[in-house]
Amino acid sequence: DAKTTQPTSMDCAEGRAANLPCNHSTISGNEYVYWYRQIHSQGPQYIIHGLKNNETNEMASLIITEDRKSSTLILPHATLRDTAVYYCIVKIKAAGNKLTFGGGTRVLVKP
Amino acid sequence: EAGVAQSPRYKIIEKRQSVAFWCNPISGHATLYWYQQILGQGPKLLIQFQNNGVVDDSQLPKDRFSAERLKGVDSTLKIQPAKLEDSAVYLCASSFGQTNTEAFFGQGTRLTVV
C-alpha cells in the first residue's frame, strides 16, 4: 500500500470548516483513499473513501486532486465532537479492511 | 444495530502472566480483525478471520499470541506469556465481507503489563 503523509496536528474553530490534507504521491491507479477517525478512548470510525472523483456524505467531503497525489478531507462545520485523530489510508479495494494506519492528524476543535 | 462488543475494557497483569480478550462482532459480519494499538501510534493489524478461518496472521507474534474464532462468530485473542511491550489497546473490528468498504471497530481492551 502507498504511504501517506499528514500533518501531526492542527486546530480549528468550532463552526468553521476543517480542511485536513493528505499527501500520497506514490499512489497506484487502483488504490483508493480512505479516511478514518479515532475519538479518544474509542475505536476508529470510517468516514469516507474515494478513487478519483470528489465524494460527499453526511459526515464529510473528500477532494482528490486530478493527479491523485494528494487529497483533502473537509469537515464542513466542525463541532467539539469532531476532536479526534484523523487517519488517511490508501489501499486497493481488494485488500478489504486490512488497514495500514500511519500516525494521523490530531485535530483539536476549539470553541 | 448493536456494535462490536469487547471485554474486558481494562486489564492489568504482571509480565509472564497470560491474558485473554473477547470480541463479539456485529451480527452477520463474516470478517473479523484484531488490531494492536500502542500508545501514540496508529492501530496495527494482527490477524484477520473470514468466518472461522484465518486469512492473514502474518503480523501475529505466534510465539506468544494466539487467536481463534471457533464457530465463526465470537473470537478470543490470547497472550501467553505477556511482555512489557505488549502494553497496548487491542481493538476488534468486523465487516460484512472481506472487500467491504467499512470496518466497524469496538472500543478496545486496554492492557497494561507491569
Image (cartoon, rainbow, N blue to C red):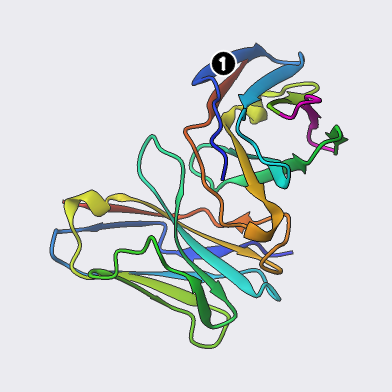
- Residue under the image location 73 percent in, 55 percent down: B101
Residue B73 locus on image (x, y percent): 58, 80
Spot the residue most to the bottom.
B71
Q: Is residue A55 above or below residue B102?
A: above
Q: Is residue A33 magenta?
A: no
Q: Is residue B67 left or right of residue A61?
A: left
Which of these two is toward me, A55 or B112? A55
x and y, in percent, of residue B38 in the image: 35, 44
Which SS type dominates the magenta stretch? loop
Task: Bin the neighbour count of mark 1 within 10 Å (Cα to Cα): few under 14, some 14-19, many 20 and up.
Answer: few
At x 78% / y 41%, what residue is drawn? A51
The residue positioned 65% from the left and 13% from the top of the image is: A12
Q: Which residue is label 1 attached to?
A: A10
Q: Is A69 placed left or right of B23 in the picture?
A: right
Secondary structure of the residue carrying numbered label 1: strand
The C terminus of chain A lies in quadrant = top right
Amino acid type, mark 1: Met
The residue lying toward the viewer, choosing from B94 and B11, is B94
Q: How many marks?
A: 1
User: Can I make out residue A111 in this image?
Assistant: no
Which image quadrant is residue B86 in?
bottom left
Instruction: Residue A82 in the image: state x and y as whole percent.
Output: 66, 29
In the image, is A14 to the left or to the right of A7? right
- The structure residue drawn at horizontal position 54% and vertical position 88%, both measured from the top left corner, is B71
Magenta stretch in the rendered image = A58-68
